[in-house]
Image (cartoon, rainbow, N blue to C red):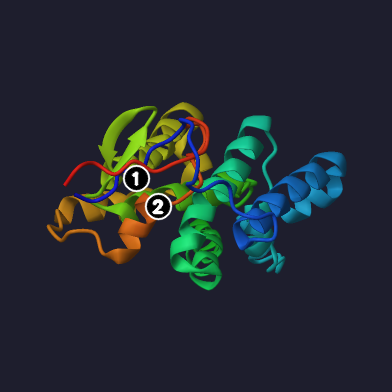
Amino acid sequence: MRPMRSFGGGGGGGFGFPSVESTAARLAIGLVVGSVLALAVRSVGSMLLLTPGAVFPGLMLWQPFTYGFVELHPFGILFGAFALYSIGGGLEMSWGSKRLLWVVLGGTVLAGFLTVLLALFFPLLRGVPYTGGWVMGSIAWVAYGLSIGRGQTNFWGIPITGNFFAGIGAAFVILNGLSAGWATQIPELPRARHHLHRRARRQPQEPDASSSALAAAAAAPWPLAPPARHLRRAPG
């Protein structure tokens, strides 16, 4: 049987959090630094956030690249940084730094430009300032689950499939949209839609070698249990 990801527990061996020199750690540190800067100097923060009307026609073309490193609420900063460090670290161990950047950071930038494009047709969105730390964290969460696919992981001690784990990440977006309004969740909707599309297709293939590596990755996603200290392999 394939190994199942186990969070928590003692014992020797196993994996821990990625190095602070890893790309995942640098993304997490960038989010914390950008958020603190935006909160400390509001004038700078307003330029880092994504405001569709400021990007076009205002030509602040850097905003789709910078908003991913800004959150203005403590929970958003903690969730985004921990997800990037832990889940992103697991993805980096399997994918490598370049692919991690293309998926997590590239997906966030793409979501920013799509938001600007959507605002051309919905004028009410043009003045809405968007943070993107939660966007990057959600992309890492959903990508991690989809990479595991039909393999298993533990969510607070409950064995679930990777696809279901990705669904939890997509559900966060939907719940936030219901509570705070859909206009606040525009950059995150493409990732939720991608997960729902994958689920609708019901692809039958088994996870590949990359998925198996992810199932044994070190970093435990927050707000899950503490990071895995060992791996348990079910008897074949």
Crowding at dot 2, Cα within 10 Å, few <14 / some 14-19 / many 20+, comes out as many
Q: Mark 1 is on which residue type?
A: Ala
First in sequence, mark 2 or 1: give its number: 2
Q: Mark 2 is on which residue type?
A: Tyr
Seen at 62% across and 62% down, the residue is: 23
Q: Are marks 2 and 1 in contact (CB under 8 Å)?
A: yes
Give residue 193's mark: none
Q: Secondary structure at mark 1?
A: helix
Seen at 35% across and 50% down, the residue is: 215
Question: Marks 2 and 1: which is nearer the front?
Answer: 2
| 118 displayed left or right of 67 | left
Give residue 166's mark: 1
| 175 displayed left or right of 3 | right
In this view, the residue farthest toward the front is 12
Q: Position of residue 218 (x, y in %)?
A: 49, 48
Q: Secondary structure at mark 2?
A: helix
Q: Position of residue 96 (x, y in %)?
A: 50, 69
Estimate the spatial distance between the alpha carbons at disc 2 and disc 1, rounded to whole Å: 7 Å
Which residue lies under the disc numbered 2?
A: 144
The residue nearer to you, when weighing 154 against 60, is 154
| Residue 189 vertical position relative to residue 98 in the rendered view, above or below | above
